[in-house]
Image (cartoon, rainbow, N blue to C red):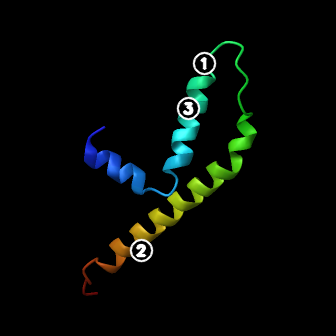
Amino acid sequence: MSAREQAEFEADRDHEAAVALRRADDAGKVAGLGVAAPESWRPVMRRVAAEAVRREQDRMSTSRSRAPLTES
């Protein structure tokens, strides 16, 4: 990851949750090691999904407002 990519990643409000999820995923690959149940991630996944939907709606709204007007 480049310095720019790292800065962009760390600017995301959910970056700490993403790192924690990655660590949990990696830890889950160790036979016999106890890790949190997938259900424990539901609140984070819902928040991240809702934010992604909001960003996409904002992006779509912005692109529509920039569309040129056509004559009818």
Q: Is residue 26 left or right of residue 66?
A: right
Crowd band around label 2 with a 10 angstrom C-alpha radius: few (<14), some (14–19), many (20+): few
**Position of the N terminus by quadrant:** top left
Q: What residue does disc 2 label?
A: 61
Identify the residue shown where x is 56% and y is 25%: 26
Identify the residue shown where x is 71% and y is 36%: 38
Is residue 66 shown above or below 42?
Answer: below
User: What separation in Å lies between label 2 and label 3 (alpha carbons)?
Assistant: 36 Å
- The three-letter code of the residue at mark 1 reads Lys
Secondary structure under badge 1? loop
Is residue 18 shown above or below 53?
Answer: above
Identify the residue shown where x is 73% and y is 23%: 34
Residue 10 locus on image (x, y percent)? 41, 51
Residue 71: image quadrant is bottom left
Which mark is drawn over residue 23? Answer: 3
**Position of the C terminus by quadrant:** bottom left
User: What separation in Å lies between label 2 and label 1 (alpha carbons)?
Assistant: 42 Å
Tell me which numbered mark, 2 or 3, is placed earlier along the sequence: 3
Q: What residue does disc 1 label?
A: 29
The label nearer to you, 2 versus 1, is 1
Identify the residue shown where x is 60% and y is 24%: 27
Tell me which numbered mark, 2 or 1, is placed earlier along the sequence: 1
Residue 46 locus on image (x, y percent)? 65, 53
Crowd band around label 3 with a 10 angstrom C-alpha radius: few (<14), some (14–19), many (20+): few
Which mark is drawn over residue 62? Answer: none
- The three-letter code of the residue at mark 3 reads Arg
Tell me whether the residue at label 2 lies in contact with that at label 1, contact meaning CB atoms closer than 8 angstroms: no
